[in-house]
Structure formats: C-alpha cells, structure tokens
Image (cartoon, coloured by chain):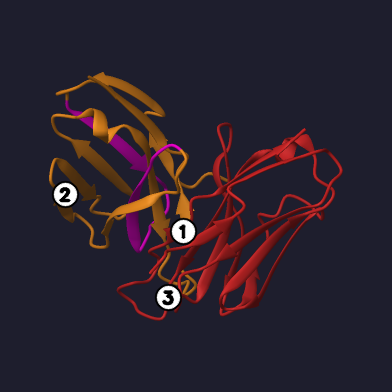
Amino acid sequence: DAGVIQSPRHEVTEMGQEVTLRCKPISGHNSLFWYRQTMMRGLELLIYFNNNVPIDDSGMPEDRFSAKMPNASFSTLKIQPSEPRDSAVYFCASSYTASRIAKNIQYFGAGTRLSVL
Amino acid sequence: TQLLEQSPQFLSIQEGENLTVYCNSSSVFSSLQWYRQEPGEGPVLLVTVVTGGEVKKLKRLTFQFGDARKDSSLHITAAQPGDTGLYLCAGGRGSSNTGKLIFGQGTTLQVKP
C-alpha cells in the first residue's frame, strides 16, 4: 500500500487566496483526520470523519476553514480566504476502526507545508 | 484544553546517554500510543500499550503504561543520532469507535554524535 497520500507537499500563496489541500487515505480505512502542526501549538486536530461523515469539527479555527469527504478515498481541506497565521504543516491521517485491536492506530501522510505571505 | 502533558519539551544529549520522556494526564485512557516524527515527515507509530502497568520493549526503547492508565513513559538506552526526532504520546478513549486520539505537545530529542 502507498500509505496516506497528501498533495501538494508545499504550497506558497498570498493572503486572501483560496487554498485546497488534498488527501487520499489508505484503502479500507474508515476514519480520516485533519491536523495542523505549528511550533507554538503542536499537533492540533481540526476535524475528523468516520465512514465519510464529519464527526467533530470543533477544532476548525473559524469559518474560513472547511473540509469535505465526498467518498472513502478522497478528502479536501479548504481555506478561504487564507491568512498569514494559517501558515503551518497540515497533516492527514487515516485509521481502521472496525477492529478493536486496530482501533486508534493512525497512519499519517507526509503533510503539506503551507506558507501564506 | 491540553489533556496530555509531555516532559521535557526539549532534550539535547550526547550519543550513548540514557533518557526518559514522560506523558502525564489527569484522565484515564483506554490505550496510549507513542509516535516518532522526523523532519519533513508525518508521525509514525512506535508502540501501543493498552493494559495498566504494561511494559513493552522495542530494541533500546522501553515503554510503560501507568497502573491507572493515566500516564506513560518512554525510556531510551544508549541513545544514538538516529533516535533524533519529535516524540509524541497520544491517548485513545475506548468509548469512541471513531479512532480519535488526544496528542501531547511532543518532546524534541536531539542526540549529538
């Protein structure tokens, strides 16, 4: 398996522009998580999906952030409009939670480094 | 609210030294995981502990889950430069069937040759 695939790896944009981050989870996994990582705040959970349904979006900073999971193999995180304070590394992770043994083990993508100028 | 506190936050040691990283909480977790993250990559799972008092060893790494399942420790013996990275502990709640984890803020380890 190729693992969790995120694109792009790096994104540089100007303040006010729309940014879309993409994630392909591991095939067969039924939970997907979006995180943001900064030096100051560490790894923060933004939103997570279970069976393509958003379960908890309380970590989404504000209305400028939105996430979708139209099917089991694809998810997007969109920021519109982007601001300099959104600069961070954004990670997507997936897990298989139908098995009690495998539950809670998350597999992370390599991340998207976002810089908003 | 930060439910998992890791200490120390930063650690710089010489090759061959031993070290311990702590992960503490006032909450009970059904499982506790340790991840390691290298620069430019995502976190990778090292170990999962699920039973209070459980000890697991992975080569030079020893992981322990507290008896009350509220804390954990990671001990590295004879650290090597290849151990350099960010170590994250993460707790799971058994009541959730969605796989959500609570992450600590991480411990950055630098092992100098």
The quarter of the picture where the C terminus of chain A appears is: top right
**Disc 2 on helix, strand or loop?**
strand
Residue, x 29% and y 35% (percent of image)? B21
Q: The orange chain is which one?
A: B
What's the distance in space between the residues labelled 3 and 2, CA to CA? Answer: 25 Å
Q: Is there CB contact under 8 Å for labels 2 and 1?
A: no
Instruction: Tell me which numbered mark, 2 or 1, is placed earlier along the sequence.
Output: 2
**Disc 1 on helix, strand or loop?**
strand
Q: The red chain is which one?
A: A
The answer, for residue A39, to whether it is visible in the render is yes
* Circle 3 residue: A97
- Does residue A23 appear to the left or right of A2 in the view shown? right
The quarter of the picture where the N terminus of chain A appears is: bottom left
Q: How crowded is mark 3: few (under 14 residues within 10 Å), some or many (20 or more)?
A: many
The answer, for residue B70, to whether it is visible in the render is no
Q: How crowded is mark 2: few (under 14 residues within 10 Å), some or many (20 or more)?
A: few
Q: Nearer the viewer, residue A20 or B14?
A: A20
Which quadrant of the structure image shows residue A58? bottom right
Q: Residues within 10 Å of mark 1 (few under 14, many from 20)?
A: many
Chain letter belonging to callout 2: B
Q: What amino acid type is highlighted by mark number 2?
A: Leu
Residues rendered magenta in the picture: B18-39
Q: Position of residue B23 (x, y in %)?
A: 35, 42
What's the distance in space between the residues labelled 3 and 1, CA to CA? Answer: 12 Å
Q: What amino acid type is highlighted by mark number 3?
A: Thr
Residue, x 18% and y 42% (percent of image)? B61
* Circle 2 residue: B58
- Does residue B77 appear to the left or right of B112 in the view shown? left
Asked if B103 appears above or below A97 in the picture, the reply is above
